[in-house]
Amino acid sequence: MKTGLLFVNSFLELKLSNSISNWIATVFRIGYLPLAPGTWCSLFAVIIWYYFLIDISILHFSLIILIVSIVGVI
């Protein structure tokens, strides 16, 4: 049986992890926009990819997309 302090700590950790996962899953809450949330998240993702991978070759970019897609399916 957990003591009160351990229970409170585990509850706070669970709440924090749910909050962080919620922010990630909704792309920093963009996914909660009322009109076309998936479209806005995709636009945000394209902008982020563009700025982080602006000087990468098309071959490397294609490999990254392939690996991310495979990991996403698994």
Image (tube, rainbow, N blue to C red):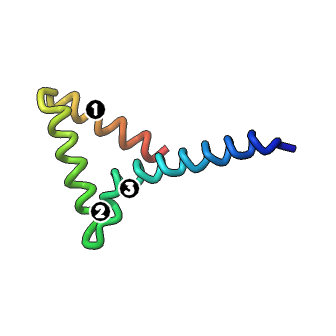
Residue at the location (46% across, 53% down)? 22
> How crowded is the residue under tag 3: few (<14 C-alpha within 10 Å), some, or many (20+)?
some
Query: What residue did someone put label 3 on?
Result: 26
Q: Residue furthest right?
A: 1
- Marks 3 and 1 sit apart, C-alpha to C-alpha, by 25 Å
Query: What residue did someone put label 2 on?
Result: 38
Picture quarter containing residue 5? top right
Residue at the location (66% across, 48% down)? 11
Q: Considering depth in this image, is 46 or 64 the residue closer to the camera?
A: 46
Identify which amino acid the numbered label 2 is placed on.
Answer: Gly
Q: Earlier in the sequence, mark 3 or mark 1?
A: 3
**Which numbered mark, 1 or 2, is in the foreground of this view?**
2
Identify which amino acid the numbered label 3 is placed on.
Answer: Thr
Q: Considering depth in this image, is 19 or 50 the residue closer to the camera?
A: 19
Q: Considering depth in this image, is 59 or 46 the residue closer to the camera?
A: 46
- Residue 47 lies left or right of residue 7; in this view the side is left
Residue contact at pointers 1 and 2, CB within 8 angstroms: no
Position of residue 35 measured from the top left corner of the image (x, y, whole percent): 25, 72
Query: What residue did someone put label 1 on?
Result: 63
**Which numbered mark, 2 or 3, is in the foreground of this view?**
3
Position of residue 43 measured from the top left corner of the image (x, y, whole percent): 20, 54
Q: Earlier in the sequence, mark 1 or mark 2?
A: 2
Identify which amino acid the numbered label 1 is placed on.
Answer: Leu
- Marks 1 and 2 sit apart, C-alpha to C-alpha, by 24 Å
- Secondary structure of residue under mark 1: helix
- Marks 2 and 3 sit apart, C-alpha to C-alpha, by 9 Å
- Secondary structure of residue under mark 2: helix
Q: Considering depth in this image, is 53 or 65 the residue closer to the camera?
A: 53
Residue contact at pointers 3 and 1, CB within 8 angstroms: no
- Secondary structure of residue under mark 3: loop
Q: Residue furthest bottom?
A: 35
